[in-house]
Image (cartoon, rainbow, N blue to C red):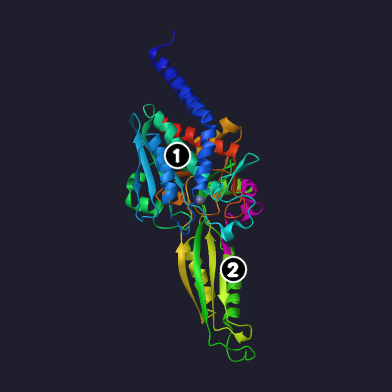
Amino acid sequence: MIDSAERTVRDGESNVSTERQQLLDWIERDRDELVRFLQDFVRHKSPNPPGDTREVATFITKFLDKAGLPYRIIAPHHEMPNIVGAFDGASPGRHLVLNGHIDVFPVADDGAGWSKDPWGGEIADGKVYGRGVADMKAGTTASIFTYLYLHRLKDKIKGKLTLTAVSDEETFGPYGARYLMEHHPEVHGDALLNGEPSSPFSVRFGEKGPLWLEVTVNTPGAHGAYTHASKSATKTAMAIAVELEKLVEIKPELSDNVRTAIDAGRATMDRAMGPGAGDIVDKVTLNIGTIKGGVKVNMVPSSATFEPDIRLPLGVTRERVLAEVEKIMKAFPEATVKETNCNLPSWVDPDCEIIRIVQKNVEALRGFTPQPIVSLGGTDARLWRYRNIQACVYGPFPHGMGSFDEHVDIEDFLHIVRTHTLSAYDFLTA
Ligand SMILES: [Zn+2]
């Protein structure tokens, strides 16, 4: 005989498994629609710069309107609207936020180097091609459809689900997620799920932070044969760039659990981002992004500028790096340095609940556990981590991201949709 308490528990469990199956059935039924949506999403160009996302935002709001889903537009810059939707479940509970950006990298030289139309959303060999399909229209599609499917089950879930489809991410601009986080605390939530490219094999609990500098060198300059008359601004710039390489020796200070997760994730990082990615994850890196100087081959240059792009790993502060830079610059009185951008590294507990939920769902769907890793590049997820909100990034492979023939495997894309949908459901029914 089953007592009534036990029956309630069993009923609850069978409801959960029925509802999870329902979600998977909807995704299966919508396969073609999901792929078509992603293709159309790519065809609505949204390169940033310039960052005008009005057309692509209208594409999304038309979809939300047709599905009868609640949303509003928050546009601190009229060319860069953000779409924010939210609904409550049947009873009070926790608040999950879905976040994805709708702007993408630009395409250089009218698509030179591409074998497909970068804005065509073309399908070949089971893959969807186009600029921004990996970064991150596939992930944002997963957020939008998660919002759609969970809305159908809103009487079954607790708490609140918020969708934020934002502009102005690719340039770390101020009008997208940063604006929302600063001015709309209703999008903070208790946890964040984001579909930026990662790889189905990894889930990201942190990211490195860029620190960008501009170094300017000024000297009197001279005729190219009169090297005794003036120091060369370009040679000085090159000498400084070489000295800055010392920054990569700075060692991070990390807690044991983060250190362990980083070590455990190195091989997965190599697999997702190419051999060597796992070696630099906990190192300061230096890239000289631009260098300009000199007017003519037979003149000693009087001016030169270059832009170091330094990436701070978890556990290295901006102050420590700037103190080192200052020490190096002391030997070059003809040079000045200016900070042009800084986003600090961010991380959450690699074993936090939303990451464990995603891992469990991937285990069930694909039979492997995605490894927690740290992202080398930046995402809007940092803004939630800065506020100590557990945040998880789980998306497709970054094939061709920022380069040529960007694409997403359709099966991987559908896997990301399933994982996000089930994980959101789990978080809001736990
Ligand atoms: Zn992105």
Determine which residue is flagged by label 1: 144
Does 314 sit left or right of 245 as displayed? left
Determine which residue is flagged by label 2: 246
Is residue 256 something that shows in the picture? no
Does 325 sit left or right of 54 as displayed? right
Amino acid on which disc 1 is placed: Ile
Confirm or deny contact between disc 1 and disc 2 (CB under 8 A). Answer: no
Please, is residue 386 above or below residue 190 in the view? below
Q: Front-most of 255 and 69?
A: 69
> In whole angstroms, how far apart are the C-alphas of marks 1 and 2?
45 Å
The residue at 42%/15% (across/down) is 7
Disc 1, ligand 1: is the CB inside 8 Å?
no
Q: Earlier in the sequence, mark 1 or mark 2?
A: 1
Q: In this picture, which residue range is highlighted in magenta?
A: 267-286
Magenta-colored stretch includes residue 278: yes
Please, is residue 249 above or below residue 258 in the view? below
Q: Crowding at label 2, few (<14), some or many (≥20) Cα neighbours within 10 Å?
A: some
The residue at 56%/39% (across/down) is 413
Does 72 sit left or right of 368 as displayed? left
